[in-house]
Image (tube, helix red, strand yellow):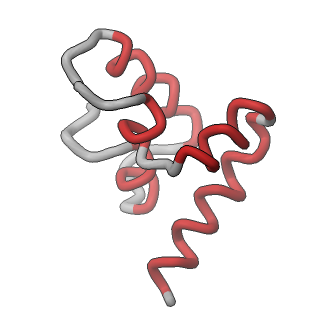
Amino acid sequence: MIGNNTFVEDWLAGVCGLDAIDDYIDRWHEGGTGVPLWQFLGMTRDEYGLWVEDADALPDILRAHRQAIRN
């Protein structure tokens, strides 16, 4: 179940796995969020662009978020 957090927040909290990103995208498509998809997912515009170009970059993007929290 997707709450009010972003995909990145929920992944960092261990609430969801990588494949759950599709559920977050579906929720965004349902409308009413008022924010761009990259923001809804919890990514920067650059991270989102990287992910769109190469879906395999998602684990690296998430690791960067985890590292930023630790620092």
Residue extending furthest toward the bottom:
71
Q: Nearer the viewer, residue 40 or 4?
A: 40
- State how many labels appear: 0
Q: Residue at x 42, y 48 (%)?
A: 42
Residue 64 position in % (x across, y down): 62, 68
Residue 30 position in % (x across, y down): 29, 10
Q: Residue at x 19, y 41 (%)?
A: 4
Residue extending furthest toward the top:
30
Residue 56 position in % (x across, y down): 78, 41
Figure quadrant of residue 24: top left
> Image height check: is 59 above or below 38?
below
Q: Nearer the viewer, residue 42 or 16?
A: 42
Q: Nearer the viewer, residue 57 or 16?
A: 57
Q: Residue at x 70, y 31 (%)?
A: 52
Relative to 55, 9 lies left or right: left
Quick one: quadrant of the N terminus? top left
Q: Residue at x 23, y 25 (%)?
A: 33
Residue 20 position in % (x across, y down): 48, 33
Relative to 11, 10 lies left or right: left
> Image height check: is 9 above or below 40?
below
Figure quadrant of residue 55: top right
> Image height check: is 44 above or below 21?
below
Relative to 44, 9 lies left or right: left
